[in-house]
Image (cartoon, rainbow, N blue to C red):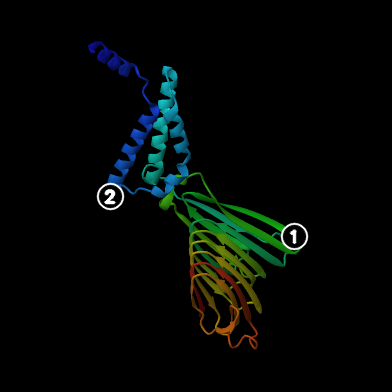
Amino acid sequence: MEEKTVHKMAHREKRTWSVGSLFWGLLFVLLGGLLLADNLNWLEVHWENVWMLWPIIIIAIGLSIMSIKNIAWKIITLVLAVTAVVLVGYAVLGDNVAPVKVDNYTVAQAVDNKDIARADVIIKAGASKINIDAKDQAEIVNANLESNNSKLDEQSSVSGSTQTVELTMATLNRWWFGSNAKNNLDISLGTKLPTDFSMDFGAADAYIDLSQAKVENITIKTGASSTTLKIGDKVDQVAADIESGVSSIVIRVPSGSGVKLNISNGLTSKHLADLEDRGGDMYESPNYDTATKKIDITAKIGVASFTVERY
């Protein structure tokens, strides 16, 4: 009996240790420590970044089922396990451990040649604070992005007498920032050329003042955002196409312009100034037929607050 007990103890001492168990142990100790630090306000922990590391779960499962006897492979696997745990910690801590300075990216796109008679401005942006206006300037567009995790790319092309300028906010490989990402995008449009304006952006706080621009067509697609759009009367007819998800949208229109609105919506709170219900999701201002300046708005809205204001 005593001999069997000694044999079992010797067998346990020789048993291969589990790198997978070590991984899970380290991971739970790390997460528990971070939860405690977050609750005590010692650190700002960005849990939203963890989902981007889901492939680590597959690595952990693989480590758990591996039976490793060779010492070299044990060391390699141990390094992988520790690296994975450190990566999780790096992600949830964000720029607590990896502060990166804010950079400025500037674009100034001039008119390509004297034959250009129209401009088409296309903007693609991510999560950011956006401010857009129009100025009496030589350039079709001036833009500045102040950011610690994105850069501003620009492309320009000419087709006939129309020059198209596309600005894209490209995310850099700094995914660990989470809520500490800083993106401030400022854009000014020129006022000399008739312009079509198109913008596609995600979670953002956007103020778009096109009241001084000769904008004839406006297209805005946005996700979860707070957006204010100010439309002017520099042209006789403006067509605005708005598509949004979970948003708060305010559209400001001149007091003398005739306004027609076609809105298809989900759960939307509507405040529509002097627009009257014409039935079939159509709303129209009393002066629409007689006004010399007209604004036609088409809106596809999800869960949102939608407001039309006069100024």
Residue that carries the numbered disc 1 in the rendered image? 159
Residue 196 placed where, x, y %? 65, 67
Find residue 289 and report its image quarter: bottom right
Seen in the picture, residue 232 relative to 93 is either above or below; the reply is: below
Residue farthest top in this picture: 3
Q: Residues within 10 Å of mark 1 (few under 14, many from 20)?
A: few
Q: Residue furthest front?
A: 1
Viewer can see residue 12 = yes
Residue at the left extreme?
Answer: 2
Give whichever of 8, 277 is nearer the camera. Answer: 8
Q: Where 143 sits versus 274, above or below?
A: above
Badge 1 element: strand
Residue type indicated by callout 1: Ser
User: For the residue labelled by badge 2, is the local secondary structure a helix, a strand or a loop?
Assistant: helix
The residue to which callout 2 is attached is 39
Q: Position of residue 19 (x, y in %)?
A: 39, 27
Q: Earlier in the sequence, mark 2 or mark 1?
A: 2
Residue 260 left/right relative to 1: right
Q: Assess whether mark 1 and mark 2 are in contact (beta carbons under 8 angstroms).
A: no
In the image, residue 42 above or below residue 218: above
Residue at (28% x, 49% y) in the render: 39
- Callout 2: few (<14), some (14-19), or many (20+) C-alpha neighbours within 10 Å? few
